Amino acid sequence: MSTFLQHLVDGVSLGSIYALIALGYTLVYGILKLINFAHGDLFMLSAYAGLGACAAFGFADAGLALGGFASWAAFSAVLAASMVAAAGAGWLVERLAYRPLRRQPRLNLLITAVGVSLLLENGAQAVFGANPRRFPDLVADTAAFSVGGVTVGTLDLAVFGTAIVLLGVLEFWVHHTRMGRSMRAVSHSHETAALLGINVDSVVSWTFAVGSALAAAAAVLYEAKYPKVEPLMGVLPGIKAFVAAVLGGIGNLRGAVVGALLLGLAETFVAAYGASSWRDALAFGLLILILLFKPSGLLGRNVREKV
């Protein structure tokens, strides 16, 4: 039983990281009805931004020698710097790549998203090199507490705490701020929102910036647990987070979180109980099943479209 519960903790931890990435997909889709295939690569760029922040703050070689509060302060500083850098990168991608094509057929935007993804991946290889780099161990992954044979590590607590705080902030921002209300209005109709005096371009830019910042938080948490940074590291997590968003109901914030947690748990249990080679294939299998039997996702709504 304790082994099962340990896998449950690990699955929720992994699912929390997927949730932060999936929210970026679902935010952009809710506003533009666009699958931003470059989102996983913004996750990758955020990891490199974290490496740069470590070097700029002098943490690159400090590792575990920081200890205690200083270690958590370093982690928080790198997390914040990565989120700011990713927000800027997301804003720039939307401004240069997507905004000029917003009134074009949706297929043009989709092809552009694939092109931006390839550009970021190959650009990262050209700038940073293809060899993997190790992310500094800012926080020691020790046992925070243990109950009944189930151990919760410090990094698991960091993942849970960061995810819960960011999800709470996002929920408040979307439902209780002026920009959040503007986002919900734009998601219903760009034209009506514009007639009401809402700056649609500003709302879309903010959406990309916030989604990218959430991906950056996921990247730093991911690197804290799996400390290898490389140009193609965003491909699989990006695809899996997209599957999680579709599983929960893309366009639905809470659905993205539910789908991500389910995917994280499914992956962990599949790997733990003898089918580790199917771990990555599981996401694609779930995507096929969802599209076949419930295309709107678990919490999504069926919407009729005029043809």
Image (cartoon, helix red, strand yellow):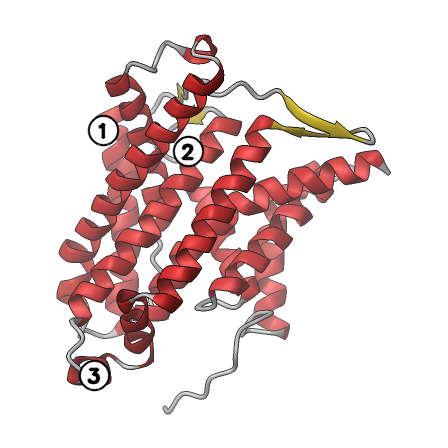
Judging from the image, what secondary structure is the residue with disc 2 in? helix
User: Which of disc 2 and disc 1 is earlier in sequence?
Assistant: 1
Q: Quadrant of the N terminus?
A: top right
Residue neighbourhood size for the residue with mark 2, other residues' Cα within 10 Å, grouped as few (<14), some (14–19), many (≥20): many
Residue 61 placement: quadrant:
top left
* Residue 17 in picture, x, y percent from top left: 51, 43
> Relative to 77, is 89 above or below?
below
- Looking at the image, do the residues carrying marks 1 and 3 touch, with CB atoms under 8 Å apart? no
Look at the image and tell me whether residue 143 can be seen: yes
What amino acid is labelled 3 in the image?
Glu
**Could you say which disc has been placed on residue 220 in the image?**
2
In this rendering, position of residue 256 left or right of residue 173: right
* Residue 47 in picture, x, y percent from top left: 36, 32
The residue furthest right is: 1
Q: CA distance from mark 1 to mark 3?
A: 41 Å
**Residue at x 22%, y 45% (from the top left corner):** 89
Q: Quadrant of the C terminus?
A: bottom left
Residue 6 placement: quadrant:
top right
Q: Which residue is mark 3?
A: 191
Q: Which residue is mark 1?
A: 126
**Residue at x 24%, y 58% (from the top left corner):** 206
The nearer-to-camera label among 1 and 3 is 3
* Residue 63 in picture, x, y percent from top left: 43, 12
What amino acid is labelled 1 in the image?
Ala
Judging from the image, what secondary structure is the residue with disc 1 in? helix
> Relative to 184, is 208 above or below?
above
Residue neighbourhood size for the residue with mark 1, other residues' Cα within 10 Å, grouped as few (<14), some (14–19), many (≥20): few
Residue neighbourhood size for the residue with mark 3, other residues' Cα within 10 Å, grouped as few (<14), some (14–19), many (≥20): few
What amino acid is labelled 2 in the image?
Val
